Image: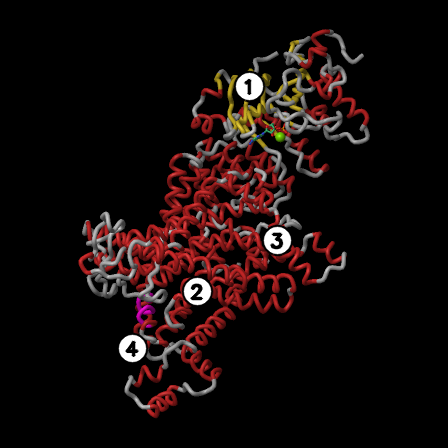
Amino acid sequence: MSEPLLCVEGLRTSFHLEGGVLRAVNDVSFALEPGRVLGIVGESGSGKSVTALSILRLVDPPGRIEGGRIRFRGRDLLDLSEAEMEREIRGDRIGMIFQDPMTSLNPVFPVGVQIAEVVEAHQNATREESRRRAIELLGLVGIPHPEDRFSDYPHHFSGGMRQRVLIAAAIASQPDILIADEPTTALDVTIQAQILGLLGDLQRRFGTAMVLITHDLGVIATMADDVMVMYAGRAVEQGSAQDVFERPRHPYTQGLFDSLIRLDDSPHSELRPIPGNPPVPIDLPPGCSFRPRCRHAMDICGLEVPSLLPGAGRRRVACHLASAQPASPAA
Amino acid sequence: MGWFIAGRLLAAIPVLFGVSVVVFTLLHFAPGDVASVLAGPMASEAIKEAIRESLGLNRPLPVQFLKWLGNLLHGDFGTSLVYKRPVAEFIFEKFFNTALMAVSGALLACMIGITIGIFAASKAHSLFDRVTMAVTMVVGSTPLFWLGLILVLLFALTWRVFPATGMTSPVGGGGFLDVVRHLVLPAVAAAMPSAAIISRTARACMIETLGQNYIRVARAKGLRRNLILRKHAFRNALPPIATVCGLELAFLLTGVFFVEVVFAWPGLGNALYYAIIAHDIPTVQAAVLLIALSFVVINLAVDVLNAWLDPRIRVSTARQGGR
Amino acid sequence: MKGHSPDRAIVPADARGSASVGVTSGTRSGLRGLAGAWRAYRRDRSSLIALVFLLMVAGASLLAPAIAPHDPSDAVTFRHAAPMSEGLVLGADGDGRDVLSRLLWGGRISLMVAVLPTLLALALSLVIGIAAGYFGRWSDHVAMRILDMVFAFPLVLLAIVIASMLSPGILTVTVAIMVALTPYITRLVRTATQSVKGLPFIEAAHAAGAGELAIVTRYVLPNVLAPALVYATTLMGFMMVVGAGLSFLGLGTQPPDADWGVMVADGRAVLRKAPHVTIIPGVMIILVSLSFAFVGDGLRDALDPRRRHR
Ligand SMILES: Nc1ncnc2c1ncn2[C@@H]1O[C@H](COP(=O)(O)OP(=O)(O)O)[C@@H](O)[C@H]1O
Ligand SMILES: [Mg+2]
């Protein structure tokens, strides 16, 4: 086991809204090792995006990072100045791509410019150098005739092509980490596979570590080394992808897999399997947030939030059942 | 792009024709009989009749209109009833003076308004934002003539920094500095309400743009905050801001009417004002036509500018043209 | 074609917010939920203060004959440009007339010039706009081409030209503003009508056998009225400024009557000696015009069912 590249400890991010404090990320910890892929899964609203944005400190008011540490190469990102974040972290050491490629490119600038500006910002390159580098990157992400497409505007590109451009901009500085927040959710199914393939290729080729956010378990199965399952702002289960897939221990994770088996004919099933909806994390009642939907709910689940207990290896589960019987609870 | 401009130009032609019809008919029914004005109060009915005859005033309306329009196209605006000179001889100088003030007012308004707007948007809901927005709201509803008087009171009468009136002819006269000295107060008066409105629009558009996904992407790319504001956000917020700036320039063409009267600026507004009082119909017609014409041209220019700012229009039509 | 300029009147709204048409989710009840609207309106403090202020100014102006301390046109030589004092709360103007009394009496005219022509234009616009937007086709074409032409004239210029054609007076200002304003409100009514026309309940009414006239008065009008009324309210403040401007130029109110624009013009002669004569009516114009804008804003939020429950 190598030294982790990124180590998030006890991260808390909240939104101070009129109706109360929304705890979007509540005491989340995880580690990312060089060259590995961490998958984060969870239903919509579980706090995946806010977790990712918190790493780059891109959460805007009324949102605020209220606690925890984000250690990256020996420094806590929460201690850096805004200028240091801009200069040394965002787009430089940590790149990020987002869910909606249709609105993520600025419509009034040619796509090449939007890649070249990253090179200019971080590598001290001249205009001509950054232009050449941008063309090279366009080729790298699989855009045909990159030379000609440099000065085309976003409206000349399809969704998939735009996401390629955004990937090119995110890796322009050869970052150590690439965060991909549901990079394929907005795309056609056929295109989804291409983009994921591209991400996998690039990740292996450059040895980039990746945080891959998705609500598609199939994607996790094929691409992730490690998994974190999120529910209502908390991590409920963590471990290596193989472990978690073979022996899911949290009833929520089990529910996810059960539904996947039931809907086996569609491999890219969305996560809407367990009856009921996840709560919005404002003024949550005490206890486990999953309790209302849990098949195994017990008295204690309404009293105490289960802590994320370490299991064998890197395995961690936040469930009273798991702490009671370390073996498989569902059997 | 070329086609776009051609289309807009074509569409402006019927509007301009309509404008001339409106101006002609409106003023045809205006009070005051041209013949009596020309002939003087003591003239007999026969003399008036003769004048009408010579000016073609007793022919059918459409004939009169066509003749008037034909003269217009030859640069003949008729003869001023007050100055007894061809209107064309003096109206263009007046127009230039008005344009000088409207354009300097509008430029001032754009610079101040856009700067304030961007700054307020970048610090939305801060103290600075709230204070400036309250001030712009008040200034935006302030009547120009009153604002002009207040500036005169403060800067001309109390502190004696700038002259309140006394501009006779910007061209020739006391030279560039003299013109600037006389221009400051009226231009500032004209600019202030427009600056207020532009700043509110600029702020709103910038805030909207700053909420777009591509701004978050730009931040994730590690671009400097300033660069994001100036390049990514402003460039996208620009079309509506340019539209408002154009509207304000157009507004100032008539808004300076009041300012000209307050500061005795020798412009079109002043000429129109005295022509109205004296029932000098040809001068009124010429002044109104010139203002309406510039109004149409400004609107056209804003349309074209906005089309050019939008790569979806600019680039795709350019490509079609190229192939 | 973008015309100038009531778009400009919407100072407090973000950009041209108020001019946009808020009829995407029409209701059958339209304006009927007045109690709910009032409750929503009350919640916005600045609109409420503006409304109270407007009502106070209107009340004081209406009561001018009873409460004005002096005769507004009583020129008393020894009071020439008198400063504020006990008997003359706001001083006297260059002709020795009591400023407070003139302000109260002038408020009647200034308020009337702000409200009356706008309401008349609103009524006219509802007829033209609904006819064009609902019955469409050629009436729409004709109406729109005419409007295009009118939009080629800045509103203030049009008002000035119309005012100059008639003999100066309050009636002239009213007519001038009404005519100049109608195209702008008509454009909004037409757009609103077109969007209501496509909503399902209109089709349902058709299917139920309702006549065109009944549909227009029962379903179209109530839904179009709300945004048009909001727009008109916002315009009232701007029209107060325009009306005062016409009077300032001598094209509006004539002596012995005086509105606030005339009062500003009168102040010019003693600007140095007695600046209050100019300042006071100008401040009133600004305050009242701002209040109309705030009331318009509050009305918009209160009448918009989507915003009401925030
Ligand atoms: N800008 C915001 N303002 C208020 N609440 C927000 C904002 N962004 C996210 N949230 C809330 O934070 C929670 C987590 O959101 P998010 O991280 O986007 O979920 P996910 O990406 O897992 O779908 C949700 O309840 C969401 O409503
Ligand atoms: Mg998300």
Nearer the observer, C123 or B316: C123
Quadrant holding ligand 2? top right
The circle drawn on residue C223 is 3
User: What is the x, y in percent for residue B164?
Assistant: 23, 57
| Residue topped by disc 4 | B82
Do the residues indicated by labels 4 and 2 lie within the same chain of the protein?
no
Q: Nearer the viewer, mark 4 or mark 3?
A: 3
Q: Quadrant of the C terminus of chain B?
A: bottom right
Are there few (<14), some (14-19), or many (20+) residues within 10 Å of tag 2?
Answer: many
Seen in the image, is C99 located left or right of residue A103? left
Q: CA distance from mark 1 to mark 2?
A: 66 Å
Q: Nearer the viewer, mark 4 or mark 2?
A: 2
Give the letter of the chain under mark 2.
Answer: C
Most common secondary structure along the magenta stretch: helix
User: What is the x, y in percent for residue A116?
Assistant: 50, 38
Seen in the image, is B287 located left or right of residue A28? left
Do the residues indicated by labels 3 and 1 lie within the same chain of the protein?
no
Amino acid tagged 3 = Asn
Q: Secondary structure at mark 4?
A: loop
Give the letter of the chain under mark 4.
Answer: B
| Residue topped by disc 2 | C174
Q: CA distance from mark 3 to mark 1?
A: 50 Å
Give the letter of the chain under mark 3.
Answer: C
Q: CA distance from mark 3 to mark 2?
A: 27 Å
CB atoms of marks 1 and 4 within 8 Å: no
Span of residues in magenta: B268-275
Q: Nearer the viewer, mark 1 or mark 2?
A: 2
- Quadrant position of residue A225: top right
Q: CA distance from mark 1 to mark 4?
A: 82 Å
The circle drawn on residue A11 is 1
Do the residues indicated by labels 1 and 4 lie within the same chain of the protein?
no
Q: CA distance from mark 4 to mark 3?
A: 53 Å
